[in-house]
Image (cartoon, helix red, strand yellow):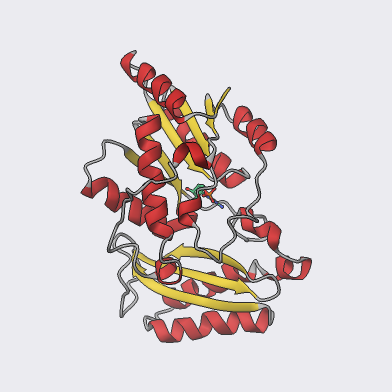
Amino acid sequence: MKLIREPDELQALALSFRASGKTIALVPTMGNLHAGHASLMDIARPQADILIVSDFVNPTQFGPNEDFDAYPRTLEADMALAEAHGVDILFAPAASSIYKADASTFVKENSCSQGLCGRSRPVHFQGVCTVVNLLFNLAVPHLAVFGQKDAQQVAVLKRMVRDLHIPVKLLVAPIVRESDGLALSSRNQYLTAEERAAAPQIHVALQALSAAVSAGERVPAKLEKLFKETLSAASDLFEPQYLEFVDRETMAPLEKVVPAGTLVATAVYMKKTRTRLIDNILL
Ligand code: AMP
């Protein structure tokens, strides 16, 4: 496996692979790699000749009061995990080589990105679209793999690829969970032991809600009440930020839950550390 730091070096190499007829898969990550990221690599690996993983904590997708500085950076361990999953190139650039000090060009999606996480994180998806576009230009992949864990990100990127006619196929990987149901996330390590013990209840509450839909409930407000009650019965450490019932493609809110195809997405703060956890379930 080759570690590349410089954007120009990655682009020159990727273009030479393309010129020699090789196919390229890209898995964009912010590093601190875990089994969720590894599952994306395992999906990508057999699909292309060359597998590139980017490992970059992208400053433009963090708001001013978010955890950009605290975000865990573990390049050595990331290299070992990537190598073990057959990655050919790990691209770990410095922010200063990705963004010139006077960079003034950004990519903004204006529909799928507005609700859910976009409401409380106004610059987030613009940062995501910009960096993914930029990574597509550097790694020139035929396909890229993203996780359903970030369901809104998937919707926004699919829309971006469609609208801008970007010649990259997007694949979506299922959510990888701990054995107790908590969705794997680099942010889980911010949790206190007590918060970590309670956190799987987010998944439990989403499943309870899904069971209620199977039993015939269709009214979002009633399902939201059930979700919140499940959380508060388990622990007083939860502070739900949103629970929304949306169309899985457009992220548009639904007035009535449709049993097949509704995405139920949530963000929940853990009160002690103010860690914000996201999770979702597709009905
Ligand atoms: P991140 O490093 O958090 O930006 O995530 C990089 C990619 O890994 C994104 O496409 C995420 O959706 C995906 N990912 C993160 N956590 C998980 C998980 N628990 N299961 C599946 N994919 C994940």
Q: Is residue 41 above or below residue 208?
A: above
Q: Is residue 59 above or below residue 137?
A: below
Spot the residue most to the right: 193
- Viewer-proximal residue, 125 or 264? 125
Marks counted in the figure total 0
In the figure, residue 123 lies in which quadrant? bottom left
Q: Give me the residue at 31% from left, 79% from top.
A: 256
In the rendered image, residue 108, in percent from the top left (x then y), is placed at 31, 56
Task: Say whether residue 168 is left or right of residue 71.
Answer: left
Position of the C terminus, as image quadrant, is bottom left
Q: Give me the residue at 52% from left, 64% from top.
A: 64
In the rendered image, residue 229, in percent from the top left (x then y), is placed at 58, 85
- Viewer-proximal residue, 83 or 95? 95
- Viewer-proximal residue, 89 or 201? 89
Q: Is residue 189 above or below residue 96?
A: below
In the figure, residue 248 lies in which quadrant? bottom left
Q: Is residue 234 visible?
A: yes
Q: Is residue 171 visible?
A: no
